[in-house]
Amino acid sequence: MKWLGFAALAVLCLALRIPRLEGPVDLRFDAGIYYTLGTSLAQGKGYRILSEPGEIHEIQYPPLLPAVAAAHQLVLGTADPDIIGPALRWSYFLLFTAYVLAVFWTASAYLATGLAFLVALIVALHFRTNFNADYFIAELPFGLVAVLFVGIVGRNDTAGSPAGRHPPGYRAVASGLLALLGFYLRTVGIVLLGLWVAESLFRRQYRQAALRMAVALLGVGAWQGYVAAVQGGPEYVEPAYPYQRAAYMMYNVTYGENFWLIEPLRPEAGRASARNLLARVGSNLSELAIAWGESISIDRNWWVGEAAKLNRMLGRELFPRWTGAAALISLTTLILGGLVLLGSRRRWLIPSYLAMSIALIVIAPYPGSLKRYAASFAPFSAIALLALVSWVWHRLARVAGWRRPIGRLAVTAVVAVILAQEIHTLRKSFRMLYYPATWVDSDGRRRTYPLLAYNRQWRLHDEALAWLRHHATPGEIIATSTPHWAYLKTQLKTVQPPWEHDPRTAQRLLDAVPADYLIIDNLLAYELGEVARRYSIPVVQAFPERWKLIYAVADSGSRIYRRVAVPQE
């Protein structure tokens, strides 16, 4: 009957994604730098950030996802996002479908077929999974690789598990290749390499473990050797402008450089001490207690909104605001219980993968990204949850003498509540969070498509970039909180404004770029935009004679300032 599950999930993926297959994939935020790096690879320039003055080498993001963008550009013979973007959207639809089917296949190594199908439903209907299918970042391909890795190794992770369905040599090669792909998609993929080595140690195959360790070190060392070579080269020592490799320039430096800031979004706070790092870990663990539950349920803010709606319907404050956080923490607790249960059954892989991944992400200085990181746990968290709920109800049924179907109905009821929340949230998201955007198709026609979170502020920002593209002179440089997106829209070199608390220092650094234009946007939902405004607005206020406002069409739109004078040193 398993094939019926695969067929039903494939149909569900079609139903979820076909209405959103029009237009380019989202290339804003991190997606823009992945795409730009892919263009550099496709043009034979190496692994460079083409948007930056000097086209510096990238040293933070591993190169596999940019290579995907490069492959699309080479096949289609262009780097135009309006042509490549729709092709990438279709590729991500295929990745989305493969991911959901892989979740079902992997879950079936740990749960009965019916429960494995419910795990796949939880993942497929989650808002974050669908969000990742619209957005050219590494989460979706990495999720597919991680799930396949666990599916292959998980069928052999204990002596009591079913015999491996693949010959040992094939399984070892396939799992090793997936681990390497995971690392070259996301740095956290090093966990997969560690587990690949640990599997051999677990089975006391020490010669094989040594070989795997050598392969893992070669894969990690190749990337780290490249990073070290860039950092030791003249381009890094003498950058194109003074703050190009500053620790807060998160796209231009390694994670390690950014890691040592107390607050990367407020660099004047200084470098972190041991006490700061411990406080960061504590804060992140506290936030993760909620984010982990959100990975297989709905966002805390949605909980608050739905609780407020119920209170209005009932005419009384029956559900306080903390209800959502309490529910999500309870869900996280159940997931942890499920992981303990898996461990007690000697199913070590999923608990080990989550423990090692969490150990890495809780030291990261980006609390706002924990939801994004925790979303990759969704398949494994759902497996742990359903394993626990199923076990509890079967134990109760045995003690109370209940019939077996009662336990199944109880498990189904728990999942039904989760799925009902997800469906409701997903339906509201499709209706409320998608806005019309435009692109020019391959036939030169301007067309409209739905784009997530493309609100009025984003539309006005893009109109400002379009205006600047037609009025700026080739070779001029833009300072903006959306540097890679602005580069794709204008083909002008772009930089992030300096995050300097002193406006005089910031002005001096902008002059040193030299930045010809400074864009102050109003992207309220974009954290980096808010940070950039914090540092850019004082500059134009402190030096009104050096910045001339040349574009402003609405109070909520982006404003463009042109530098009109360079200070005499």
Image (spheres, grey):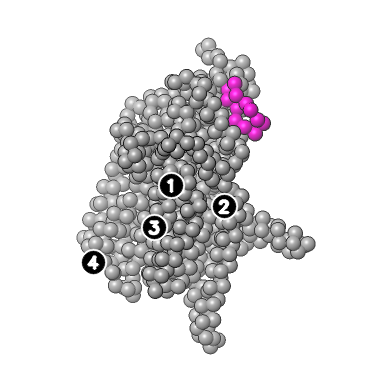
Q: Which of marks 1 and 2 is nearer the N terminus?
A: 1
| Cα–Cα span, label 2 and label 4 | 44 Å
Residue 89: numbered disc: 1
| Cα–Cα span, label 2 and label 3 | 22 Å
Q: Is residue 397 visible?
A: yes
Q: Name the residue under label 4.
A: 167
Q: Which of marks 1 and 4 is nearer the N terminus?
A: 1
- Span of residues in magenta: 550-561
Q: Earlier in the sequence, mark 4 or mark 3?
A: 3
Determine whether the residue tagged by mark 1 lies in a helix, strand or loop: helix
Q: Residues within 10 Å of mark 4 (few under 14, many from 20)?
A: few
| Cα–Cα span, label 4 and label 3 | 23 Å
Looking at the rendered structure, the kind of residue marked 3 is: Ala
Looking at the rendered structure, the kind of residue marked 2 is: Phe
Q: Which of marks 2 and 3 is nearer the N terminus?
A: 3
Q: Mark 2 points at which residue?
A: 430
Q: Does the magenta stretch include residue 556?
A: yes
